[in-house]
Image (spheres, helix red, strand yellow):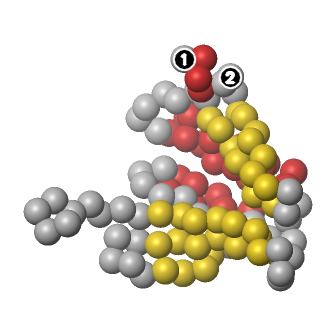
């Protein structure tokens, strides 16, 4: 740890079966943690957080949330330096993790 520590930011999501609600947490490299409603990390966050700030509302259903993520992906495809055509969207709910895709399957490239 002392010779080569890693600095890692993480977003951790899950579903609480007792409270019957999903939660998302943002944890930075200094171990500061905050509960958030939405999030993005890295360079892409410069483009995505403004879209999420504008479009996120309390009580979104999965279809509405995926539409916001699709707006973020389209913005990245226009403005991001690297042309990434394929994305995987994952949704967490009481039934577990559901995998949704945007574009072709990334494993095919």
Measuring from the top left, give residue 10's x and y in whole percent: 47, 63
Q: Front-most of 30 and 83? A: 30
Query: Spatial distance from mark 2 to mark 1, Cα to Cα?
Result: 9 Å
Measuring from the top left, give residue 96's x and y in whole percent: 79, 55
- Circle count: 2
Q: Front-most of 73 and 19? A: 19
Quarter of the figure with the N terminus: bottom left
Looking at the image, which residue is at 16% across and 59% down?
4
**Number of residues whose C-alpha sits closer than 10 Å to that of mark 2, classed few (under 14), some (14–19) or many (20 or more):** few
User: Would you say 64 lies left or right of 31 here?
Assistant: right
> Which of the 4 quarters of the picture holds residue 54?
bottom right
**Number of residues whose C-alpha sits closer than 10 Å to that of mark 1, classed few (under 14), some (14–19) or many (20 or more):** few
Q: Front-most of 6 and 80? A: 6
Residue 65 higher or lower than 71, as above or below: below
Which residue in the protein does label 1 denote? 109
Looking at the image, which residue is at 49% across and 80% down?
33
The numbered dot on residue 50 is none
Measuring from the top left, give residue 102's x and y in whole percent: 71, 33
User: Would you say 104 lies left or right of 107 here?
Assistant: right
Quarter of the figure with the C terminus: top right
Q: Are marks 2 and 1 in contact (CB under 8 Å)?
A: yes
Residue 91 higher or lower than 103, as above or below: below
Of pointers 2 and 1, the one earlier in the residue sequence: 2
Looking at the image, which residue is at 66% across and 24% down?
105
Which residue in the protein does label 2 denote? 104
User: Would you say 6 lies left or right of 34 here?
Assistant: left
**Residue 71 appearing in the image:** no
The secondary structure type at the circle numbered 2 is loop
- Work out which residue is located at the far top of the displayed protein and give it: 108
**Residue 104 appearing in the image:** yes
Looking at the image, which residue is at 54% across and 59% down?
40
């Amino acid at each position: 740890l002392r010779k080569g520590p890693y600095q890692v930011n993480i977003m951790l999501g899950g579903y609480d079966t007792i409270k019957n609600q999903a939660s998302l947490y943002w944890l930075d490299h200094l171990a500061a943690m905050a509960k958030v409603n939405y999030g993005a990390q890295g360079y892409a966050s410069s483009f995505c957080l403004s879209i999420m700030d504008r479009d996120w509302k309390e009580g979104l259903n999965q279809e509405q949330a995926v539409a916001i993520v699709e707006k973020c992906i389209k913005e990245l495809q226009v403005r991001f330096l690297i042309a990434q055509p394929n994305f995987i969207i994952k949704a967490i709910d009481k039934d577990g993790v559901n995998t949704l895709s945007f574009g072709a399957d990334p494993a095919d490239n």
